[in-house]
Amino acid sequence: MDNTQSTMITTLGLDPITLRQQRRRRWWWWVLLLLLIGLGIALWRATPPAPTLSYKTAPAHRGDLVVTVTATGNLRPTNVVDVGIEVSGTVAKVAVDFNDTVKRGELLAQLDTTKLATAVLKSQAALASAQAQVDQVQATVIETQATLNRLERMRKLTDGKLPTEQELIGAQAAQRRAIAEEANAKAAVIQAQATLDGNLTDLTKATIRSPINGDVLKRAVEPGQTVAASFQAPILFTLAE
């Protein structure tokens, strides 16, 4: 500070120290203002621009409107089927359980088929024996018929002298007996065939299959359990579709 400035400060009554403090304060205010301006510019640049809204258009057309509705309530099956069994035996296998989903023809349970299979084999043997008996009796019919024909020709050739009346009657009786035995043998074949068919049916019924597509509502049988089919078939499963 030169003498002229000092003289002016003294003349105006200003304190040189106070004047320096005021200048320094103004200088800090300018610095603070510049910092605020710089900070504002930095924040403005750092702020991402607002997203630009875009719209997509398409031509209107007819279509299906799918609406999903959620609700609570009780489900009732449209059809309930009780599955029983018509043959007696021991349950060897249970293939389904409560609440399982089954398809038509699917295995539900299986009985032990040892006795049923044995019965089928016996009835097959009985049928074969009956058929063999028919063959044997038919041979006897042919034989007795041939004997009777021979005796009748002989009687004609000998003008009734041979064979004797008793021999001719005996041949006729033998032929009639052979025919009757043939009828009995054929009836035995029919009976043996019916027995075989029944045993085969029982063997088939020992395998329990689902008659419908649905769910198992109830299972009333366990492996190893003995079931007895008498006048009414026991219910083993209840199915619903």
Image: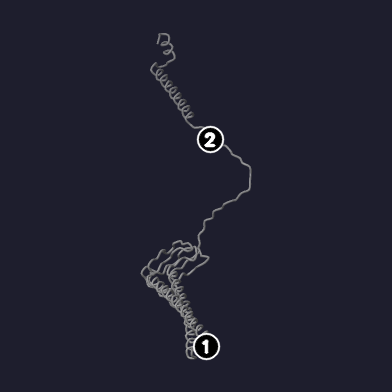
Q: Position of residue 137 (x, y in %)?
A: 46, 79
Amino acid carrying label 1: it is: Thr
Q: Residue furthest front?
A: 158
Identify the colour scheme used: one colour
Judge from the rendering whether residue 203 lies leftward or rightward of residue 152; answer left or right: left
Residue type at tag 2: Pro
* Residue 204 percent coordinates (x, y): 44, 69
Residue at 41% from the left image edge and 67% from the top image edge: 110
Q: Which one is nearer the viewer's eye here, 22 or 166?
A: 166
Where residue 207 appears, as percent x and y from the top left, is 43, 67
Across the whole image, how many numbered discs are drawn on residues?
2
Q: Secondary structure at mark 2?
A: loop
- How packed mark 1 is, by other alpha carbons closer than 10 Å (few <14, some 14-19, many 20 or more), is few
Q: Tag 1's secondary structure?
A: loop
x then y, percent, for residue 170:
47, 88
Instruction: Work out whether residue 190 or residue 159 is closer to the camera in this orientation and state it.
Output: 159
Which of these two is toward me, 203 or 32? 203
Image quadrant assignment for residue 217? bottom left
- Farthest-out residue, top: 3
Between residue 63 and residue 111, name the one nearer to us. 111
Q: Residues within 10 Å of mark 2 (few under 14, many from 20)?
A: few
Tell me whether circle 1 and circle 2 mark residues in contact (CB < 8 Å). Answer: no
Residue at which label 1 appears: 158
